[in-house]
Amino acid sequence: METVHELVIIGGGCAGLTAAIYAARAKLDFVVLQGSLPGGLLTQTTEVENFPGFPESIQGAELMDRMYQQAKQFGARFLIDSATSVSPENKGYTLTLASDQFLKTQALIFATGSHPKSLGLPQEKELLGGKGLSVCATCDGFFYRNEVVCVIGGGDSACEEAIFLSKLCKKVYLIHRRNSLRASKIMADRVINNPKIEIVWSHVPVDFSIDSQGFIEALKVRNVSTNENRSLACKGVFLAIGWQPNTEHFKDFLTLDAQGYIQTLNGSVCTNHPGVFAAGDCVDARYRQACVAVGMGAQAALEAEKWLMENE
C-alpha cells in the first residue's frame, strides 16, 4: 500500500526546522526535505548577535545544528533531497524529488528560503568555481588572508561581509552603486569607521580581469555619473547584491509575486491551495531575519496541524 504522509516540509533552514519541531511534538507523520544545503544559508553566517536567548552571540552553523538536533529529539525524519515539482492529486499532493522518487502527502509547508543574486557578467559562473568569485565570506574568506578583496553591495549583508573580511584581508573595497549605504545605521557606521574598508561610491562592476591561470586579478567598475572606468586590483570578489527566493520549480503551482516570492492569504502563512502553507525567506522579502523565519515556521506547523485535524 502506498504511503501518504500527513505533512511534508520542503526546506531545512530556520523556518523548516522550527516547523519540524512543532510537527514532531504534535506527533504528525511527516518528513523534512533538507535540500542541497541542510540548515540553510544561516550555516554560512559567523556570529549571530540578534537571535533571542544568546546574549554572547552564537555561530550560525551551531544555531542551526541545535535546531536540527532538537527536531530529531522529538522524532523528526529528514531526507537529503529536494522537490522539483508539486501537483495536486486525490485531495492531497504528489512531490517529484530530485532523486526521481515521489512523495505523497495531505499537507505541505514550503520553507525553501532564498539565494544570492548574481551580477550577470561574463565568466561569472566559471569564476565561482574557486577562481576568485564568492557569495560567502564566511566560507571563502580564509583563502584571501592578507590579500585585497572587493565586496559588491550596500545593504546589511554587504556590510557584514566587508567587516568580516576586514579581519582577514589587507584591504576591502566596498562597491556600491549609490552615494549612501542602504544598511542599518549601526552596520553602516561600522563600515565607514573601519580603516581597512574603502567605500567606492556610485560605481557598478562591469567586468573581471583574469590572469593567465584563470583567476581574478582585478575588478573593473564604472562610475554611474561620469561613465569613467576604474580597475581595482584584487584577488577576490564577494557578491552581496540581493536575494532570489527558491521558488522557480513551483511557479506553476503556487501564486508568486513579480520577484518570485510566495503570495500568502491576508498576511497569513496560508497559500491559495488547501493544506499548503509557506514560511521564511521564500515569503518574506522585507525582513529576512532568522527570528522572523522561526516565527513563521511555527505558524505554518500550527496551521498545518489544525488543517489536518479539521480534514480527517
Image (cartoon, rainbow, N blue to C red):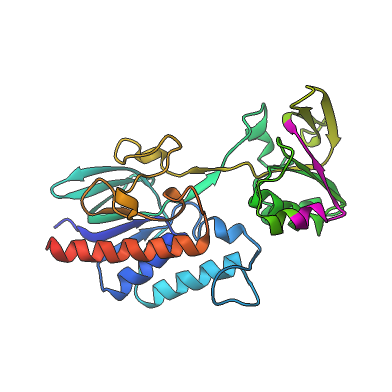
Query: In the rendered image, which quarter contains the N terminus?
Result: bottom left
Q: Is residue 140 visible?
A: no
Residues shaded magenta? 189-204
| Image quarter of residue 176 | top right
Residue, x 14% and y 50% (percent of image)?
91
Q: Quadrant of residue 218?
A: top right
If the image is split into quadrants, where does the C terminus sit? Answer: bottom left
The answer to whether 296 is drawn above or below residue 101 in the figure is below
Residue 77 part of the magenta-drawn span: no
The answer to whether 167 is drawn above or below residue 123 in the figure is: below
Residue 240: x and y, percent?
65, 45
Q: Position of residue 211 (x, y in %)?
A: 82, 31
Could you say which quadrant of the image residue 5 lies in?
Answer: bottom left
Residue 86 placement, left or right of 13: left
At 35% from the left and 40% from the top, the residue drawn is: 250
Residue 151 falls left or right of residue 75: right
Residue 255 can be seen, yes or no: yes
How far from the left and from the top, in percent, is residue 195? 87, 54
Front residue of this view, candidates 258 and 76: 258
Work out which residue is located at the far top of the displayed protein and give it.
227
Q: Residue at x 80, y 50 (%)?
A: 144
- Counting every numbered tag in the picture gives 0
> Which residue is pictured at 78% across the width and 22% down the height?
227
Residue 277 drawn at (x, y percent)? 30, 54
